[in-house]
Image (cartoon, rainbow, N blue to C red):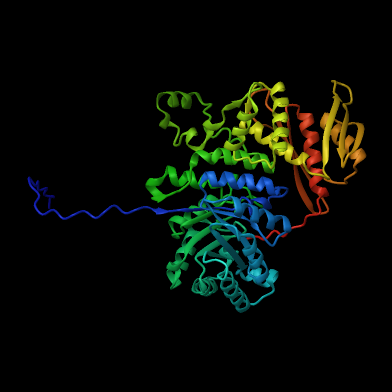
Amino acid sequence: MPCVYLRRTRQINQPKLPEATVAEKLIIFDTTLRDGEQSPGASMTRDEKIRIARQLERLKVDVIEAGFAAASPGDFESIKAIASVIKDSTICSLSRANERDIARAAEALQAAQRKRIHTFIATSPLHMEKKLRMSPDQVLVQAIQAVRYARQFTEDVEFSPEDGSRSEMDFLCRVIEAVIREGATTINFADTVGYAVPELYGNMIKTLRERIPNSDKAVWSVHCHNDLGMAVANSLAGVMIGGARQVECTINGLGERAGNTALEEIVMAVRTRKDHFGLELGIDTSQIVPASKLVSQITGFAVQPNKAVVGANAFAHASGIHQDGILKARDTYEIMRAEDVGWSANKIVLGKLSGRNAFRQRLEELGITLGSEADVNAAFSRFKELADRKAEIFDEDILALVSDGEQANEVDAFHFVSLSQRSETGELPSAKIVFSRAGEEYISEATGNGPVDAIVNAIEAKVPSGAELLLFSVNAITTGTQSQGEVTMRLSKAGRIVNGTGADPDIVVASAKAYLSALNKLQSKTEKLNPQI
């Protein structure tokens, strides 16, 4: 029978349409300062963590996991400092499911305007048997007691079943139902070893939410590792299939092994495909690239050029067909604009004629707070010295200057003084370096396969560290042949892995600074625990 279409000429008593549904918010939980720091050699100083936390606040991240308070005195002090200066984001500290860790987290978070304690315990048969050496019933009791104790310090308590993706469904239901009953307000389902597959992971969370009677009393969260390259896909499946409304992620996907879910990819996927996800975000996306560059510069982990959103080639169009399309209409080959994620922020800001006030103002705009006028004067002096050698000063140059200054302020550190080197085709390169420690100057000369090898040999001749060089990486901080070279040296000794970074228009000098920076970190006796969730 054919369809019949009736045309109405007048509508009478038309029912009122329902109001548009308000889109749900996706909570962005950043763990760059905790899980990201567990990348080999990515340890950060207190001041560096504060700088990153300030940038995360400008990015408008909802929750900042500032560290693991019980890991070390340094972690505790960093969390305490961040809690006192960050006003707009919730500050979180991780803790194992025991009273000592939780009390330490609570103490570190005292000054926070909004605080969260994040406690966890392993729930997979493998982890319970081999790592915890506990029975499932013992794990259940400890999880309940941990959440109950954490609730004495804050109403905002997050619980994670570590290795959740390899845990048994029935046991997960028992544990999660119990901790929600005790007052856990966020349940974070952890794919600790990157074992999950998107559809299976999403459906596992969906099943848990359907089977657990009080699942609606908590916000569900996802925390995925990238061992199989599916962290972002798994996280988005957890959101769309499982109904999670918080994603735990890091800037640049930084993290142990293959890394974590990349914040910038999650945010831009949800923002660009709002037609599919239908979720709201509180993130200021124009701060993504500045955050990426800051984290890369501080940790020494360079961003690969073809990295989504924040890679140098993310918005570069080399193909002639693509270039033609972009010129005619940007949306032919661009699904998002470079300026939306902050690429336009990479502008020339200062030159050699810029004054001290302009320099100070730019520091403030970059979220850099120096401890005293003497520190500002010292940084300005380094800026002037660089401006005499380099006509155009970019934000990245200023960040590098500040990092160099922070290293120079360390009392017991090795400090670069001067360097000379000779390299000629067919001749063995040689180098002479002057560096100091605690007021004592060292002068050393050596040869090597190249100028950098000669410099390292010269340093080792005076300070035999016995360390193994795992990585030597050189990157241009900005564009052009006048760019500063940023060098990362990764050293390993007795199981410890550290990254040293150095920046200078002369990459041999930058290499010397990086090697001395790495030696300084090896000299540090600081030991810390690195929990995994």
Please state if 45 lies on the left or on the right of 62 as rendered. Answer: right
Rendered image quadrant of residue 433: top right
- Residue 499 location (% of width, % of height): 74, 44
Please state if 395 lies on the left or on the right of 384 as rendered. Answer: left
Name the residue nearer the viewer: 68 or 83: 83
Q: Is residue 227 visible?
A: no
Name the residue nearer the viewer: 361 or 428: 361
- Residue 444 location (% of width, % of height): 92, 33
Rendered image quadrant of residue 162: bottom right
Total residue callouts: 0
Q: Residue at x 52, y 71 (%)?
A: 176
Rendered image quadrant of residue 509: top right
Q: Is residue 86 visible?
A: yes
Above or below residue 241? Residue 413 is above
Q: Residue at x 63, y 78 (%)?
A: 138
Name the residue nearer the viewer: 222 or 72: 72
Q: Residue furthest front?
A: 373
- Residue 458 location (% of width, % of height): 89, 35
Name the residue nearer the viewer: 513 or 106: 106
Above or below residue 167? Residue 467 is above
Q: Residue at x 66, y 31 (%)?
A: 397
- Quadrant where the image shows the C terminus: bottom right
Q: Residue furthest bottom?
A: 137
- Residue 267 location (% of width, % of height): 49, 46
